[in-house]
Image (cartoon, rainbow, N blue to C red):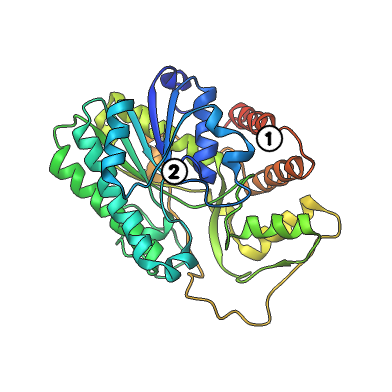
Amino acid sequence: MEFDLGFYRDKKVLVTGHTGFKGSWLCMILNRLGAKVTGYSLAPATNPSLFEIAGIDGICHSFIGDIRDFDHLMKTFKEVEPEVVLHLAAQPIVRDSYKQPRYTYETNVMGTVNILECVRQCQSVRTFLNVTTDKVYLNREWPWGYREDETLDGFDPYSNSKSCSELVTHSYKSSFFADATVAISTARAGNVIGGGDFANDRIIPDCVRAAVAGKEIIVRNPHSTRPYQHVLEPLFAYLMICAKQYDDNNYAGWYNVGPDDQDCFKTGALVDLFVKYWGDGLAWSTPASNEGPHEANFLKLDCSKIKSVFGWSPRWNLDTAISKVVEWSKCWQAGGDIRACMNEQIDSYLSQNP
């Protein structure tokens, strides 16, 4: 890996959004690295949830709370005294942001303000990372990747609220952490896939639900292009950024985290891979009409900066990523040992040279 994994042994790490898909995987990794993990989040948003299936509450100190509740959040910070803070908590679904725009902004913008205010008032924190999204950019539907200095102006309430979250982080960094007492960064990740994602309105969870039910997969936008990557890719990148900037504030900044160009797939091609690995005669089709709210057709990240600064590069291509999704999903379908499956995939990822 591009950093010493031993950095996290005995480190006090606070993860917001730990009951979510990415947060659950992150807690599993941190536990294997020997960190003292605390999570702060709402109760799991899906049923089933990876958090419950994998028993994540058994490997971390879990606080169920709302990041909009500053007093409760501050109380948690004072009790835990974290050294490392990774902020993943969010309302993450584009379509849900059209249904609940106010809640989306309250969570994604004021939630970020609350987290940063706790970081500002908590003397133990040394390194902070705000996880946002590739959708923070003003999407001009051009065929090349967005770089970190492009305009931030997401279209829909979710994307725009994450753009605002970025700007809040930039302001706090300049206003309160210019003395480098706390290293502050953001990471803009592409579309993340992996075993244990049960969210609504996401393509891989839709594929898994259809496959388990023995039904045809319905694909809304088969021609939309996205930077798909396995969940372990950005999670280890987040951990790398936090570890590197802990010792050297010069690493703090804004980073895209996405796949190589060949893994920016059209959604239909992604589903073709899923169908290939699942087997059992699985098939997909498009709906007769798709009258849902606006979603971008083309989105791609330029990840030159994180590669140049850290020597980072993806380890798993999309073919491997989909095979791992299917492996996890069939383990779950068969009532297998989910923790063992996750740990095997983490070990497999770490053994693969980038």
Name the residue at 78% across, 58% down: 213
> Disc 1 marks which amino acid?
Ile
Circle 2 — which element?
A: loop
| Quadrant in which the C terminus appears | top right
Q: CA distance from mark 2 to mark 1?
A: 20 Å
**In the displayed structure, would residue 310 be above or below residue 301?**
above
| Residue 306 quadrant | top left
CB within 8 Å, label 2 to label 1: no
Question: Which one is in front, 7 or 122?
Answer: 122
Report the side of 148 relative to 325 (left or right): left
Q: Earlier in the sequence, mark 2 or mark 1?
A: 2
Circle 1 — which element?
A: helix
Residue on which disc 1 sits: 338
Name the residue at 43% across, 43% down: 41
> Disc 2 marks which amino acid?
Gly
Count of labels shown?
2
Question: Which one is in front, 37 or 266?
Answer: 37
Coordinates of residue 343 in the picture (x, y in percent): 63, 29
Residue on which disc 2 sits: 17
Name the residue at 77% across, 66% down: 216
Question: Which one is in front, 166 or 70?
Answer: 70
